[in-house]
Amino acid sequence: MIPAKKLLNTLSEHWGVLELLFKRFKMADFSIKDLQNAIKHKQPTWHNERIYKETNRLLNQDIIIPLAKSSQLEINRAIADFATFLLQEEHLGLAQEISVLVEDLARLGDRLANAGEVEDFDDLRRFSRIMDDRVRKIMKLYAHNENAILNIVEQAKSNNAVQSLQKRYKAVIEAFDEYIEPMLEMIDIRGEFHACFNLIELQISTQIERIEQSGKAYTDKRMLEQLRTRILEMHLVGRESLRKSADMLMPLREELRRNNLITRQAAKVLGLVRKNGVDNMLTAVQPHFVSDAQRYSLGQQRHIVAYMASLVEFEHQEYQLPDQQDVPPFQTPNIPDYNDVKSSFAKRFNTKRKKPQPLLQFLDESYPDLDAEEMLFLYQKLVSDDELEKSQSDEKARFKIAGQYFSLYPYNSQPQKPSKADE
């Protein structure tokens, strides 16, 4: 058995080499030449004999171990886990790991309550210790996943590879979908986890009160109080860790969303340019520098001098920007006036029309040239208008609007009740 002090001295002397191997190969195997090159890189003054000697030293102390039936090497798994902890190079785990531990914590809470009812204080102490170990593991997983998300964000920001933003931020989206969203559902205040923690706290508090009343096993009271405090702290730490993780991922996720939106709009513009030509599409918006006559003729020196003189004398016009309160909210020019839409709706669904019709169908038939976003904007305005009589369907329906499909519980028109005069 290798003495611990000797092993620690070797790790201290060659920590730079191990850190270089760990970051370069990412837990993969490497050759003995790679190991010697790493030592040479960290100690350029050492001669070959010294490098060979230190290589054997790392191999003999099982810090670097050979792979079975191979000439390749790898870092000892225990050393690699220790380096992972020191370098904060954790990999993101699954939300299901925490879910399993919390479910086990609930099972142990039931067994602890049963042991307290039959006054089996040996089992009471044993289950308290096991529950304390589960709580510590959950808190370690929170810290581990928070560091892993920090590494994901830093790698996504520092990645200068020539590839799309979608590929660079792929790990960010996966982390949000596989960890953040499941954890948000788990720790919801109306979810099962919150009820589980309340039940465990109640069970432990009941055992503490029972010990105070009976006076038996009074030394175990302190252990139960510490367990209850640690469980409450675990719940608080979990919510805070999840909030920090979401705050780190959300800016990158929003950046990717904006990038996708800009990419779609740019692709739409380029498609129109290819179809209609540059002159037809951009003539109205391009800056006017020369006249049409100068565009197709060779300019003379006096023309160029006059043009440069006009540029020198150019002065921009002062423009007073309006205040934010004075700026009306942007509304696309394609959307018709809402009052006209409302009037058309009232005329169409009068007392003579008895059969209800979905509002989206009415908008699609009345304004077929609108885009899907503009159609949904008018739909939302009609739904929110309290003056219109409408009802929501209990069954989900699928609609095609401007070439796009939507699934929702639609609002339908409801004919107004006929007045006494109509009757």
Image (cartoon, grey):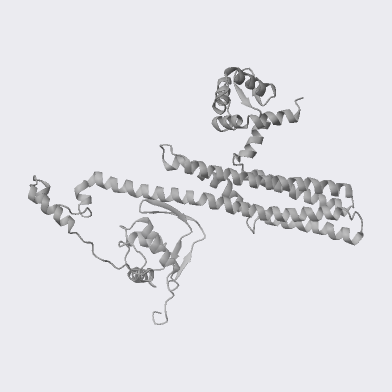
**Which residue: 34% across, 50% down?**
265
| Foreground residue among 271 and 180 | 180
Residue 146 horizontal/vertical position (percent): 60, 47
The quarter in which the N terminus is drawn is: top right
Residue 97 horizontal/vertical position (percent): 66, 43
Residue 356 appearing in the image: no
Residue 131 horizontal/vertical position (percent): 77, 48
Residue 72 horizontal/vertical position (percent): 59, 20
Residue 403 appearing in the image: yes
**Which residue: 46% across, 51% down?**
254
Q: Is residue 111 left or right of residue 162?
A: right
| Foreground residue among 290 and 252 | 290
* Residue positioned most to the bottom: 421
**Which residue: 33% across, 60% down?**
365
**Which residue: 7% across, 50% down?**
302
In the displayed structure, 228 sits above or below 76; it is: below
Q: Is residue 292 left or right of residue 405?
A: left
Exactly how many numbered labels are in the figure? 0
Q: Which picture quadrant has residue 225?
A: bottom right
Q: Is residue 96 left or right of residue 248?
A: right
The quarter in which the C terminus is drawn is: bottom left
